[in-house]
Image (cartoon, helix red, strand yellow):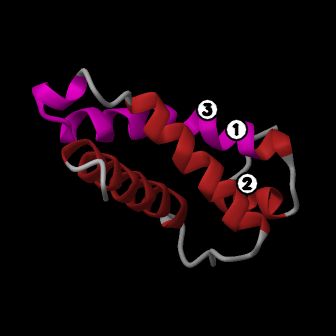
Amino acid sequence: MSDPSSEQLWKRCAEGDHAASAEIERRYTERLLGLVRAQLSESMQDRIEPESVVNAVYELFLRKTVQKKFIWQHPDSLWHLLARLTTTRLLERLRHERDPRV
């Protein structure tokens, strides 16, 4: 049996399928962690854990997917969405680290 496509996983996540969300995490976690690490300066690497950023992204993605807030558009939609959410979340964390009042 072949692996489900990203679109199939996305649709299953929208239905609350925990196995689908686990498969998405399995497929994309290392790439997302690499994305975070590549954007962190040395001074911030001790202050921001890439895993916490990625975990927050998955929580947001799953919540919004179940709420039907995200729309599938093309085969790379899942990666592009997760990467954009990760970059946005990281920028929020960086702003907070620089100025906790934000």
Q: Is residue 16 magenta?
A: no
- How far apart, in angstroms, are the residues tagged by discs 3 and 1? 5 Å
Residue 22 shows up from this direction: yes
Q: Is residue 74 left or right of residue 71?
A: left
Dot 2: element: helix
Q: Is residue 95 left or right of residue 5?
A: left
- Residue 60 percent location from the top left of the image: 61, 56
Q: Earlier in the sequence, mark 2 or mark 1?
A: 2
The label number, if any, that marks residue 23 in the structure image:
1
Q: Give the magenta part as a residue range.
A: 21-45
| Tag 3 and tag 1, C-beta contact below 8 Å | yes
Which amino acid type is shown beneath numbered disc 1? Glu
**How many C-alpha atoms fall within 10 Å of the one at disc 2: few (<14), some, or many (≥20)?**
many
From the image, tell me which residue sits under label 2.
Answer: 9
- Residue 19 percent location from the top left of the image: 82, 39
Dot 1: element: helix
- Residue 1 percent location from the top left of the image: 82, 37
Q: Residue furthest front?
A: 101
Which amino acid type is shown beneath numbered disc 2? Leu
Please tell me which residue is depicted at 55% across the width and 38% down the height of the picture. Answer: 55
The label number, if any, that marks residue 26 in the structure image:
3
SS majority, magenta: helix
**How many C-alpha atoms fall within 10 Å of the one at disc 3: few (<14), some, or many (≥20)?**
few
Q: Is residue 90 left or right of residue 16?
A: left
- How far apart, in angstroms, are the residues tagged by discs 2 and 1? 8 Å
| Tag 2 and tag 1, C-beta contact below 8 Å | yes
Which amino acid type is shown beneath numbered disc 3? Arg
Dot 3: element: helix
Relative to 54, is 13 above or below? below
